[in-house]
């Protein structure tokens, strides 16, 4: 369901373009926004040790001028990580990120289990009727009338925890672990003290943020950032390659060595967006040594 390499490129691309403000720092305190209680409660529905976590507040973003001018459902639908899932929700429930979907939480672990939590307004009867009529879906019944739907081709399980919360995963056990989670539960991601501490330090928490404290994932972000910068530098206006674009193995090896030494010092990397008439992006790093 999730193409990790493609997601890394998307994150790197977001960092490079459409920025009015960009901060790259190490252990610098940025007076972070408080983590809303409702957002914190929903983190209990994600797995304990993900390689990354992303949060989207579509309700607030689509009220901004930047969203109206530059973003739409098609932008996210074209992205292969979320596109198929968002298309499924739209077909079954008649909602989209432009109308009906308010928030989305997304996380992924190294063993390949994905967790998606969507907050919005859903017509559960419409979803049930749609799935009942489609042979690509099956239902799994649990005690108490709880029903988990399964999209067979995509190996995607999902269910309604309540009228405003849809939870999905390609791993059924992860779905089942959320059945007993309440607003006061200290489970899932909430039980990961280190990562929760780093989430609290994210600068902007209102529109969109992403965080990872997994070394290999952080390395992937830096490598893709470097690759995209190379492509930008090697192409002149009009698409012509400069004379200096010939391959320099020594320079590339030195750059990769420097990149490796940087990412090894970083305990976590996060970026957050503040959307209004324009887009403001802050990237933060927590390092092993504050003097590194």
Image: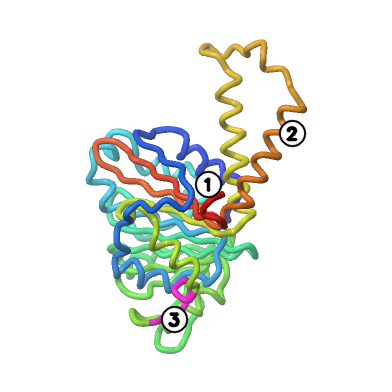
Foreground pick, 197 / 211 = 197
Is 174 situated above or below 123? below
20 vs 241: above or below = below
Earlier in the chain: of badge 3 and badge 2, it is 3
- From the image, tell me which residue sits under label 1: 80
Residue 161 appears left or right of 246: left
Q: CA distance from mark 3 to mark 2?
A: 50 Å
For marks 1 and 2, give the one nearer the viewer.
2
Give the distance between the C-alpha atoms of the residues marked 3 and 1, in whole angstroms: 28 Å
Q: Is residue 138 above or below residue 243?
A: below
Q: Position of residue 91 (x, y in %)?
A: 39, 55
Q: Residues within 10 Å of mark 1 (few under 14, many from 20)?
A: some
**Image quadrant in which the N terminus is located:** bottom right
Image point 30% across, 54% down: which residue? Answer: 206
Task: Write down the region rendered in magenta.
Answer: 185-191
Percent across and percent down for residue 107 are 50, 61
Residue 291 visible in the snapshot: yes
Residue at 29%, 65% in the rendered image: 36
Is 199 inside the magenta-drawn segment? no
Residue 195 in the figure: left or right of residue 94: right
Residue displayed at 38% across by 72% down: 160
Question: Which circle marks residue 253 in the picture?
Answer: 2
What is the image's colouring? rainbow
Nearer mark to the viewer, of 3 and 2: 2
């Amino acid at each position: 369901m999730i193409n990790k390499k493609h997601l890394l490129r998307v994150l790197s691309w977001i960092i490079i373009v459409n920025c009015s403000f960009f901060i790259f720092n190490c252990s610098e305190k940025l007076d972070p926004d408080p983590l809303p209680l409702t957002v914190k409660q929903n983190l209990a529905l994600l797995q304990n040790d993900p390689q990354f976590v992303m949060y989207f507040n579509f309700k607030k973003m689509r009220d901004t001028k930047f969203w109206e001018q530059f973003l739409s459902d098609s932008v996210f639908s074209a992205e292969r990580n979320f596109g198929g899932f968002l298309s499924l929700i739209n077909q079954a429930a008649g909602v989209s990120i432009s109308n009906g979907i308010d928030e989305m939480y997304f996380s992924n672990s190294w063993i390949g289990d994905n967790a998606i939590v969507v907050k919005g307004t859903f017509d559960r009867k419409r979803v049930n009727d749609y799935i009942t009529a489609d042979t690509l879906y099956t239902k799994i019944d649990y005690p108490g009338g709880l029903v988990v739907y399964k999209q067979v081709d995509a190996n995607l399980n999902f269910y309604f925890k309540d009228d405003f919360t849809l939870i999905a995963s390609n791993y059924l056990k992860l779905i089942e672990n959320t059945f007993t989670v309440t607003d006061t539960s200290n489970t899932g991601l909430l039980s990961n003290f280190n990562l929760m501490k780093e989430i609290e330090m994210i600068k902007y928490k209102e529109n969109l943020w992403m965080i990872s404290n997994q070394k290999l994932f952080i390395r992937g972000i830096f490598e893709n950032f470097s690759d995209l910068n190379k492509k930008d530098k090697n192409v002149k206006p009009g698409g012509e390659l400069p004379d200096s674009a010939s391959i320099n193995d020594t320079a590339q090896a030195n750059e990769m060595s420097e990149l490796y030494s940087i990412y090894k010092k970083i305990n976590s990397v996060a970026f957050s967006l503040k959307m209004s008439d324009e887009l403001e992006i802050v990237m933060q790093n927590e390092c092993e040594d504050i003097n590194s």
